Amino acid sequence: MLDDFSINGPLVSAIPGFRPRDAQIEMARAITTAIQSQQTLVV
């Protein structure tokens, strides 16, 4: 999931003007952690 928000990720080509932001990467990390640990996460 972190790759989706990277400078070379699919969102760059799919969304005109898309720029990766630290908050997006932080959110992706939190989601990945919640999924792996089977926890609830509200973002």
Image: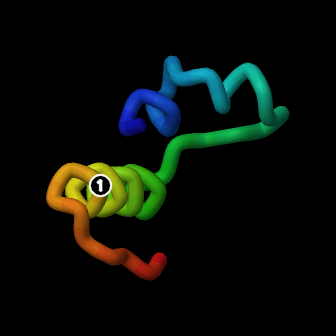
Q: Quadrant of the N terminus?
A: top left
- Residue in the image at 66% along x and 31% along y: 11
Seen as rendered, the residue at the extreme left is 37
Q: Secondary structure at mark 1?
A: helix
- Residue in the image at 52% along x and 43% along y: 20
Please give the residue where the numbered disc 1 appears in the rendered image.
35
Residue 34 drawn above or below residue 41: above
Quadrant of residue 31 within the rendered picture: bottom left
Residue 10 drawn above or below residue 5: above
- From the viewer's perspective, is 32 left or right of 15? left
- Residue in the image at 47% along x and 77% along y: 43
Q: Residues within 10 Å of mark 1 (few under 14, many from 20)?
A: few
- Residue in the image at 42% along x and 63% along y: 23
Give percent across and percent down for residue 10. Answer: 62, 22
Residue 29 drawn above or below residue 19: below
Give percent across and percent down for residue 7. Answer: 50, 27
- Give, as a three-letter code, the residue at label 1: Ile
Give percent across and percent down for residue 13. Answer: 73, 20
Give percent across and percent down for residue 9. Answer: 53, 23
Residue 12 drawn above or below residue 32: above
Instruction: Report the number of discs.
Output: 1
